[in-house]
Amino acid sequence: MSTTPLVHVVDDDPSMRAALRRLLDAAGFEVRGYSSTGEFLLQPLPDRPGCLILDMRLPGPSGLELQTALQQRNIMLPVVFLTGHANVTASVQAMKAGAVDFLTKPVKREVLLDAVQRALARDAVQRTAREEADRLRVRFASLTQRQREVFDRIVAGKLNKQIADELSIAERTVKREREQVMAKLDASSAADLGRLAELLQRSAGK
Amino acid sequence: MAHALLIALVLVCVAMPLHAAEEDEHVLMLYGLDPYLAPFLVMDKAVRESVAGGEGARAIFFSESLDSQRFAMERLEPELVALLAKKYSALHIEVVVAVSRTALDFFVQHGERIWPGARVVYVGFLGYEFKPSALPPGASAVLSILDVAGTIDIARRLQPDAHRIVVVCGVSEIDKQAERQAREALAKLDAQVPVEFLSGLPLPELVPRVAAEPPDSIVIYLTQFRDRDGRPYEPHDVLRAIVKTSRAPVYGAAETLIGLGVVAGSVASYESRGRLIGEQVRRALAGGPTDPKHVMLAAPNRCVADARALQRWSLGERRLPSDCEIRFKDVPIWHRYWWQIALTLAIVAAQATLIAALLSQRRRRRLAEQAEQAHRASLAHASRLAVAGELTGAIAHEINQPLGAILSNADAGDLLLDSGVDRRNELRAILADIRRDDLRASEVIQRLRDLLGKQKFERKELDLNDVVNDLESILRAEARRRGVGLEIRPAPETLAIMGDRVQIQQVLINLVLNAMDAVVELPEARRTVVVSVAKGAGGAVLAVRDRGRGIAPEHRAKLFESFFSTKPSGMGLGLSITRTIVEAHGGRIRAESGPEDGTVFQVELPLTIATGASSPHPA
């Protein structure tokens, strides 16, 4: 897996596409250009860091429609909009849908590269979070039935004694299971466990 | 057979005058002398006019000439009489006008045989040994006077210091009578001025003889029909010859001599004499009293002078009698042609007024036309600005696209230079792209300036395809912005029209935006606008078709009216301006609409004459 970030450019104007490709290339990115939404969706998306520079107005489905489509497919590629003519409605819609930025042509190099950097940073964060959640799920899967019951109750803020009463087991047994859970999930405190629970819940909701 | 008939018909026609209708009356002009002498021509014309002008039956004129000055009558007379008797045997002559004494004598002698029952009007000079007793019964006479005395009197007024009087005359019978009169008149002259008669000198002798006269002599020309050698002359020719070289002023006593070079004379008017004769002829035809014989004098002689001759011999006009008529004087043109000039001036003035009125009318009309055109142009301009507002997004997109590419290319070039690696080819490609995009952007701006600028109405030859091509990118951008499909179908051939490019573009924009408005809310399959250019029967046709809901029947009538709109924010100017523009270009616009088929707006513009089936593109 290459570590060079891959920037996707969707713009129907060949001249604009070529210029962006040159600029991003010179700035050290790998670039792929597409002339329409459909062309982008038809290409297989490699699993590597990257972002998407997207024109609003495109022949066929628009940039906004592509953004929606990606979200529906659970493709978390950060989007930077770059359009010839911005209007308020479209920009609000784009930002609400999670766009990194909404830029208008002509765009200054620093502004564009900054947006691309931010998009890549977000991509990196998202990737890390996704990897952490994956790891956490693997660990969580190694818990026994009893250990999961104990985990749920710790996260709910209950004391060892209350847990022992609820599960009708000895308080000492609860204490032992708790240490097992902490070790398996690599947590150091009850608060730590709460954060993990939240993370798990969020990634499960996806 | 047909020939024989024709000849018979011709013969009948030729014979007709001799058996003329009963009511016609017949007058014979019988000349003793050559009837073509100048005085007779004037007189004859007046006689005929006078007779024709009177009441009563139509008079038919005949004329005979004895020409007794040049032919010996006594030798010809028997045959001539016989001939004339035969000639007039079938024709009844009512009146014979006998001009000169010879003619009268001939009539008296032979009239009863040749023209039985004819009455005679004698025309002659008083004192030519004429006695009223010589006239036959029922005759009348019109006599005039050869006023030699009066002529000499005029001559002496003009030349009081004259030393000599020279009289030129011939030797024929008439010449001699004139000479006798002159001698009588001169005899009465009390002044002691020597007088010399040059009678019957042959012309080659006469001319130098007169020319030798000193300027202070008086030359009187009478008549010269014949010289002493028997050579005949036209009397006027003799006068012309001597006047040409004479240093002394020449005078004459006949009206027709005035104008041929003589200074002046006491003359009788031949025309008034002719009229008088005419009256007598009418009187005779009417059967006036036959006795006593009617003798009357022609109008009295008057002094008539020739201004040119006066000037030639430096004679003072003031010395002439006050009632003297001076002919050939250079009267001011205004006096001679006053009414013609006035009429011409009036016509010229009327024409000038008319032209001025027409010019001013034309000017007013042109001003009104200009005002109307300016008004239309400013309305159209306002409407274009409104349309531009609608197109802002598309326009910004069209401009920002190349600008964005330029900036990014420049930035890329910058980065490439910073990298230190030699990527000259890539840099060159970047520069080429920048140049191309720059031109693209400026082209868009130029077209916008053309469209939005407030320029004058300019008629030029255009290809309708080009007008559409120019707007294609902006219209496409707008179509994309609205999510509407746009199809453009140009004509395969050049369609040359005369018109204002911007206004035609405006027509296109208005129609296309209207069509997009019509389809924008429809399902995607119907969201398409088709623009087509084609050659139709009546010219170039620009059609804009949509698949919208069509025009409501109740809106059709008001479709092209100002301030009529079905859109919530519409001004209602688009279609009315569109129609105004189309009609100003001599074209027509019409809309066809059905609920399922959508609407087609068709603009028909006249092709220029040059547009053939495949004329070359007009640059």
Image: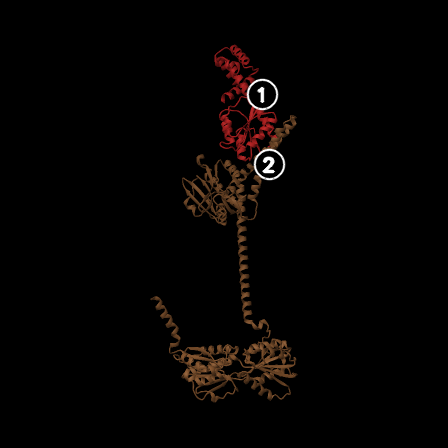
**Can you give x and y, in whole percent of width and height, for residue B57 in the image?**
41, 78
Colour scheme of the rendered structure: by chain
Label of residue A3 in the image? 1
Question: Can you say which quadrant of the picture contains the N terminus of chain A?
Answer: top right
Q: Quadrant of residue B328?
A: bottom right
**Can you give x and y, in whole percent of width and height, for residue A205 in the image?**
49, 22
Relative to residue B182, is residue B107 drawn left or right? left
**Chain in red?**
A
The chain holding disc 1 is: A
Cα–Cα gap, marks 1 and 2: 37 Å
Observer-side mark, 1 or 2, equals 2
Depicted B232 relative to depicted A81: above or below: below
Q: Quick one: label 1, few (<14), some, or many (20+) residues within 10 Å?
A: few
Front residue of A15/B114: it is: B114
Q: Quadrant of residue B284?
A: bottom left
Q: Colour of chain B?
A: brown
**Can you give x and y, in whole percent of width and height, for residue B365 in the image?**
53, 56
How many callouts does the rendering have?
2
Q: Which residue is at 57% across, 73% downward?
A: B335
Label of residue B438 in the image? 2
Front residue of B552/B449: it is: B449
Specify the amino acid type for callout 1: Thr
Q: Can residue A32 be seen here?
A: yes
